[in-house]
Image (tube, helix red, strand yellow):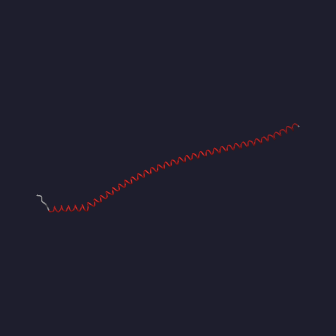
Amino acid sequence: MLRLDWNLLFTMINLLILFWVLKKFLFRPVLEIIEKRQQLIEEQLTNAKQVGAEAEQLKEEYVMSISKAKKTRERMIEEAQKEANEKYEEIIEEANVKATRIISQAREEIEIERNHVMKSMESQVGVLAILAAKKIVSMGE
């Protein structure tokens, strides 16, 4: 009942030989290429993770650097304001001292001028008194 046909047997043998040839010359190289690509992809993923970690670290360093720069800037601004306030106070103090000195000198000059005017008036009063006395004496004669 079951009959074995030579064609069927040769076809089976041909299929087995074809499978072996394909396995040896096609499947193995294709599988090797697939495996190499898979390794390459895994390496690229590893590198990408490493680069991502380095980028994150650089970002953190950048943020810290900016924070330090802001603190330095704020400190410098505070120091500049402090120096400006000190200079302002120093200038005001110098101005007050100069103003006091000028006022004092003006008062001294006024006092000297007043004394000079008083002396001049006293000598003129003396001269006027003498003239008045001469007139009185000359009237009496």
Question: Could you say where residue 101 lies in the image, as x and y percent from the top left?
Answer: 67, 44
In the picture, measured across the screen, residue 102 lies left or right of residue 81, that is right
Give whichever of 135, 16 is nearer the camera.
16
Residue 123 location, x and y as percent? 79, 42
Return the x and y of residue 47 as percentages of the image width and height.
Answer: 37, 55
Q: Quadrant of the C terminus?
A: top right
The total of numbered circles placed on residues is 0
Q: Quadrant of the N terminus?
A: bottom left
**Residue reaching furthest to the left:** 1
Left or right placement of residue 120 versus residue 28 in this view: right
Vertical position of residue 76 compared to residue 38: above or below: above
Residue 55, percent across and down?
Answer: 41, 53
Q: Residue furthest top?
A: 140
Left or right: where 94 falls relative to 138: left
Q: Is residue 135 left or right of residue 110?
A: right
